[in-house]
Image: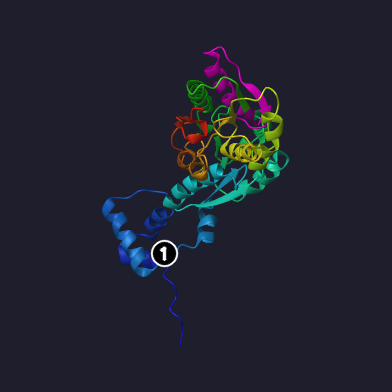
Amino acid sequence: MSLKRPPTIRDVAAAAGVSTATVSKYINGLQRFTPEVEQRLTETIARLGYRLNQQARSMVTGQTRSFGLAVQDVRNPHFANIIKGANRVALEQDYNLLVVDVQERAAHERHLLEALAGRVDGLIVSSRLPDESLSWLTELGKPVVFFGRRDAPGIRCVRSDGHRAAYMLGRHLVDTGRRRIAYLGFPAARWDGERAAGLAEAMAANGLAPIRHAVEAPTMEGGQREASSLLMGEARPDAVVCYNDLVAIGLMHEAQALGLRVPEDVAIAGFDDVPVAAYLHPALTTVNMRSEEQGEVAMRLLLEAVRGEGDASDILMEPRLVPRASTGRPG
């Protein structure tokens, strides 16, 4: 007994009363048709159980129907949310998303991104490398969208306003009575400088200036390691703004282990509004940098670029302050 053969593109065309060229253009997203024709094609494809041969389509169109997304640390909920947002839009448009975790190691970025570029139709990139070190990436012949502003012509970018976010945190801490405010930053990050500047501007309005410290890695372990040197000296700050929520969580955990009360002895805040922030004790004050929305917008910009639509864009997203108990007024 012979097995039933799978339906072909010719079967779909015959059943829908259109040409095979029309079916090919429709399923490959190369052309739009009238709503009636598109509905008939959709119903026919579903009824026959037609499945596109992805390898054959790639050979014909020169497209992989895949995009690449490179993030700094997939364990960081900020980047996990970016992936979630980007993947949702990719799936809506029948694209696959290939994710590369560069693991906060700038030395490996170029190798990983070059390898990824050969397998996808476009790239979304979060990079620690300076602009002058990334010219090779734009020469690979693939559309690229960056997280964070790039001072290069024709580049699409998505970013949240880090300066504004830190300014809001600074004003919040000053308004709750803090005067000795430290910034526990991560200078290797592209947006560390704008966060430090925003905090400094907010404090300067009251004749204050931030105390600067840095972590070796933007992780909970990084924040934990800096706790003793930052919080146990004679000039202990009464508030600390951390580079991100992970650093803040590590710092707060170790501060409590050292016998300090949060927020009575020291207020602690971060950036990103990771899901666990609301469930800590005390709950962590932070700034929502709209990570998931950044992923969605980046993917839509990349789709525009692949289709030759729109112009180079620098999308700036407004952050949102989320005050919680970790910065409450001291008793």
What residue is shown at x 52% (from left), y 39% (from top)? Answer: 282
Q: Please name whichever residue, 160 or 239, is drawn nearer the observer in this view of the structure.
A: 239
Q: Quadrant of residue 43?
A: bottom left
Magenta stretch: give its range.
184-213
- Residue 319 in picture, x, y percent from top left: 46, 31
Q: Is residue 202 magenta?
A: yes
Q: Please name whichever residue, 234 or 118, is drawn nearer the observer in this view of the structure.
A: 234
Horizontally, is 294 left or right of 21 in the view? right
In this rendering, is residue 289 above or below 38?
above
In this rendering, is residue 246 above or below 60?
above
- Residue 225 in picture, x, y percent from top left: 70, 38
**Residue furthest front in the image:** 331
Q: Which residue is mark 1?
A: 9
**Residue furthest left in the image:** 36
Amino acid under disc 1? Ile
In this rendering, is residue 271 above or below 13?
above
Horizontally, is 268 left or right of 33 in the view? right
Q: Is residue 140 visible?
A: no
Horizontally, is 77 left or right of 297 in the view? right
- Residue 230 in picture, x, y percent from top left: 68, 29
User: Which element carries disc 1, helix, strand or loop?
Assistant: helix
What residue is shown at x 71% (from left), y 31% (from top)? Answer: 229
What residue is shown at x 36% (from left), y 59% (from top)? Answer: 19
In this rendering, is residue 288 above or below 52?
above
Q: Is residue 309 magenta?
A: no
